Amino acid sequence: MRKISFLILVTSCVSLFSCRKEMGKPSWDTEVLTPLVHGTLNINNILPDSVLQTNADSSMKIVFNNNLYNLTMDTIFKINDTTLTQGYALPIAQTMSTGLAFINNSTTTTYQLPGVELRKVIIKSGKVRYSIKNKVNHIMNFKYSIPSATLGGNAFAIDIDVPSAVSGVPGVYDEIFDLSGYTLDLTGPFHNQINTIYTSLLAKISTDPPASVVINPQDSLVITNTFFDIIPYYAKGYFGQNTFYIGPSESNFTMFNRIVGGTLQLEHVNFNFNIENPIGLDARMYVTNLNSTNTRTNHSLALVAPSLIGVPININRASESGTTVYPTYANFPLTTNNSNIKPFIENLPDKLGYSIKIMTNPLGNVSGSNDFIYSDKLLKASMNMEIPLSMVAHDLTLMDTLAMSIASPTGAQNLHSGTLTLFADNGFPFDASVQLYLLNDNNAVGDSIFGYANTIVQAPINASYRVIDKKLTKIVLPISEAKMNEMYTIKKVALKVKFNTAAQPNYVKIYSDYTIDVNLVGDLNYTIHLN
């Protein structure tokens, strides 16, 4: 968990007080005045440094990327499990010599993929299950291959013996084979089909032991061939002219996760709606709805943007060279002039709702069945924001849950009473009210460590709303023995900080050199024991 305020330092220093009385040993009380903590906090203690950047004039800005939607391969097509069961039997009883072919044929299996015509697939993961029931009273040899499935230039092939039937009980073979990494040619044995796997089977009466075998009509062979859990890494062909409706759905928006109350006004918001397409597929997209939802306030605001919402967005196909893909991009800047993006963001959303319609290949098979897709390179819609930290904050409240571990009191002295005094030299143009709550095992808020309201006073500013000096605030925190005993049992605390910017309703900027200097001093009463 991150540091947000000096209060985290308060909880860490409490571990110094880890003593309990032991009966029957000499003791006396003493008072100690001691500095406990000194440190400097900056804007990174309030916001994650991963989203902060510094401008040339030292003012700060937030740069945040949020992924809204990723198209999955399953949206375009899905290769379902396919099972083919075949039985082989002679019409009349015959005596056959060992080594003689009983079955010698090829089979094609065509996947049902409405509107999609696949010619090639590289399998990311998937399996084939090959099962045989042998009712012949002799061992049977099977040579099974998938000429259309190759790995390193070699076709998938197995050579197996299946036990003979015994007293009417069939001999059984059942095995699962991994097809990961194999390339499937789905054009059939003559390369004039689509979505088709080609298999070959040669079954012989085994020459071990050599003999003549009488085979009756009921002495059949039953072969079941199942392709299952096939997930492509790469596919090529024609992906069809289809329409997909996505949503209504929601995406998490994490930028304001710690904010639990108050309002924030932003002077400027630079916002871009971006589409990246690494798929060899033309598409037409409609963003039919985009909502900013604050679940803390139950307020939702629809984006109004005539250049984006409800209008066709033509997305050009990507290109490939070998295994290198060259995506295409579409970008839609949203400003206060062409949208309501400012109140959309000032709603402090934690969810973004959306509804999208996607039409594939709106002009038909213009690629000549050379559409392509990689499982790890998929079309995505995202939002990129750049927000200068020039703002008006009114009771803007941040809350975070922090782990707290205080050593059990097993030492040679015990805290009796005392105070912690915080000296905060504030170099920020806002005041900050702070509170720390103890949480029980169910994360329910219990007692507060501060028993009263307290505020770190804002720094003085000039006519340009720039801080000109720091402002010192003194906060006294009484520590009773009862409070300490309660804190020993607590594993988590909730930190709440409430901000109000200076010079409201004017916007104030935050600069990289703004800091708060923190000094924590303890005036503590101990009971000292002799061991």
Image (cartoon, rainbow, N blue to C red):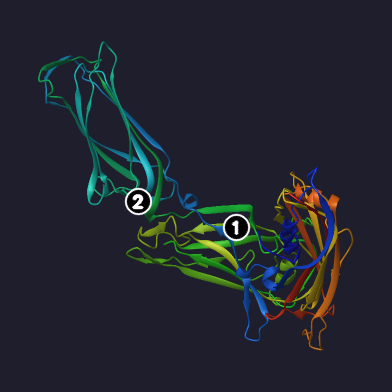
The amino acid marked with disc number 2 is: Val
In the visual, does 330 lie left or right of 293? left
Locate residue 24 relative to residue 196 in the image: left or right: right
How far is mark 2 from mark 1, CA to CA? 28 Å
Furthest residue to the right?
452
Q: Callout 1, which amino acid?
A: Ile
Hey, which residue is sitting farthest top in the picture? 167
Residue found 75% across the figure and 75% down from its top = 516
Point out which mark residue 356 bears.
1
Residue 520 position within the rendered picture, expressed as x and y whole percent measured from the top left: 78, 68
> Could you tell me which secondary element the residue under label 2 belongs to?
strand
Marks 2 and 1, the one that precedes in the sequence: 2
Instruction: State which mark lies toward you, 2 or 1.
Output: 2
Identify the residue at horizontal 14%, vertical 16% (top origin): 213
Quadrant of the snapshot with the N terminus: bottom right
Q: Quadrant for residue 161, please give it.
A: top left
Say whether residue 234 is left or right of residue 486: left
Please rate how many residues cluster around mark 2, counting C-alpha atoms within 10 Å: few if below 14, some from 14 to 19, many from 20.
Answer: many
Residue 170 numbered tag:
none
The image's mark for residue 121 is 2
The residue tagged with tag 1: helix, strand or loop? strand
Q: Residue at x 26, y 39 (%)?
A: 199
Q: Residues within 10 Å of mark 1 (few under 14, many from 20)?
A: some
